[in-house]
Image: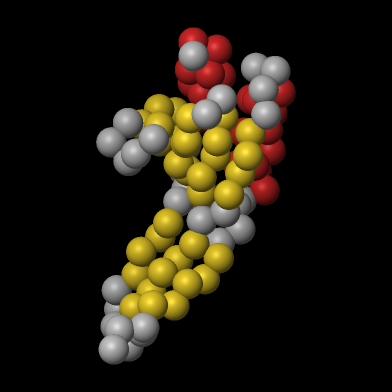
Amino acid sequence: MVKIIKEDLDIEEALKKKLEFICSFCNTDCVIQNGSIRTIEKTNLSYVEPHRIKIKGITFLAFNYETSIYIENLSNKILIKDLEEYIKSI
């Protein structure tokens, strides 16, 4: 039987502050859900689940220590510094 171990990851404090700061400029709130690491026991396979950030009904995905943020899925990427413009354009 395959056993999957899930360990929660805390969002990096600097990333959290950046996101909250950008949202305060856009007069909106963000809901942050921490990501996790999922590992299959007795193997070297693991999956890093990104942090999920909900802003204006859109889910953004972020990883710690990254300069990019993903929109809805991992194929649409923008820089965190451009997030304010993107939110204002919605």
Task: Using residue 60 as the reference point, say whether residue 9 is left or right of it.
Answer: right
Q: Residue at x 47, y 36 (%)?
A: 60
Q: Residue at x 36, y 31 (%)?
A: 77
Q: Residue 35 versus residue 15: which sits nearer the camera? A: 35
Residue extending furthest top? Answer: 89
Residue 24 left/right relative to 37: right
Report how many numbered discs are placed on residues in the image.
0
Q: Quadrant of the N terminus?
A: bottom left
Q: Position of residue 47 (x, y in %)?
A: 36, 64
Q: Quadrant of residue 34?
A: bottom right
| Residue 45, image x, y percentages | 29, 74
Residue 13 x %, y %: 67, 48
Q: Nearer the viewer, residue 9 or 80?
A: 9
Above or below, comparing residue 28 to residue 75 in the picture: above
Name which residue lies at 34% across and 39% down.
73
Look at the picture and state if 42 lies above or below 60: below
Q: Is residue 42 visible?
A: yes
Q: Is residue 81 visible?
A: no
Colour mode? secondary structure
Q: Position of residue 26 (x, y in %)?
A: 65, 17
